[in-house]
Amino acid sequence: SNSTTIFTIENKCSLIVFPVIFHGAGTSLPSSTGFSLLPGESNVLTMPRSWSGSLWGRTHCSHDSDGNFSCLTGDYASSTINGVNASPLATLAEFNLNFTSNGYDFFDVSVVNGYNLAMMVEAQVGNGFGDCMTTGCMVQLNKTCPSELKVMSGGDCIGCRSASQPFSKY
């Protein structure tokens, strides 16, 4: 069917990741906008065919004594597991599905909001045509992050802020 696109979101990390999805203007959200994935676990989502938005993973998440949900990376202060909008300190996958009159899909992986997880987007074209490349950032940037950009927790670098935040530079 040309009416939907299937996203399989897989956690290949050694920690629990809480993916979140945020939609662009004029497009609807899938049924699930936030969930948890244990290491090795995956979740399949059916996305609207003409969808734009972002997907990112949150890490080091918990509920406080009042039941409010928060994460040390990729959070947006909504206090729930569902997505609200894009946040700093998260590797972003950005999508525009069926974006042009000829139906092309566009996607990228960006660290403009900072970096917290290695991420890869691998397109699998169901109709047998297309020139889709795999893209992503598979380098563990937390290991090479400059000290002034590091976000630390328990002695470990858990994220690398974008240089635009402390230095007002890209």
Image (cartoon, rainbow, N blue to C red):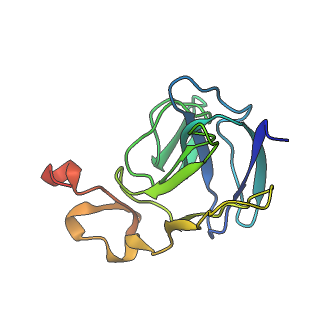
Instruction: Pinpoint residue 158: horizontal percent, then vertical percent.
Output: 42, 63
Q: Residue furthest right?
A: 1
Instruction: Kindly identify the residue that appears in the image at 72 percent across and 59 percent down.
Output: 38
Which quadrant of the figure has residue 1? top right
Query: Relative to residue 152, is residue 93 drawn left or right?
Result: right
Which quadrant of the figure has residue 153? bottom left
* Count of residue discs: 0
Instruction: Pinpoint residue 17: horizontal percent, then vertical percent.
Output: 61, 55
Query: Relative to residue 137, is residue 80 drawn left or right?
Result: right
User: In which quadrant of the rendered image does the C terminus lie?
Assistant: bottom left
Question: Does the rendering let one see residue 57?
Answer: no
Instruction: Kindly identify the residue that appears in the image at 39 percent across and 71 percent down.
Output: 141
Frontmost residue, 65 versus 113: 113
Q: Residue furthest front?
A: 102
Instruction: Pinpoint residue 3: horizontal percent, then vertical percent.
Output: 79, 35
Q: Is residue 94 above or below residue 118?
A: above
Query: Relative to residue 23, is residue 35 drawn left or right?
Result: right
Instruction: Kindly identify the residue that appears in the image at 65 percent across and 29 percent down.
Output: 29
Frontmost residue, 130 versus 160: 130
Frontmost residue, 2 versus 84: 2
Query: Relative to residue 170, is residue 141 drawn left or right?
Result: right
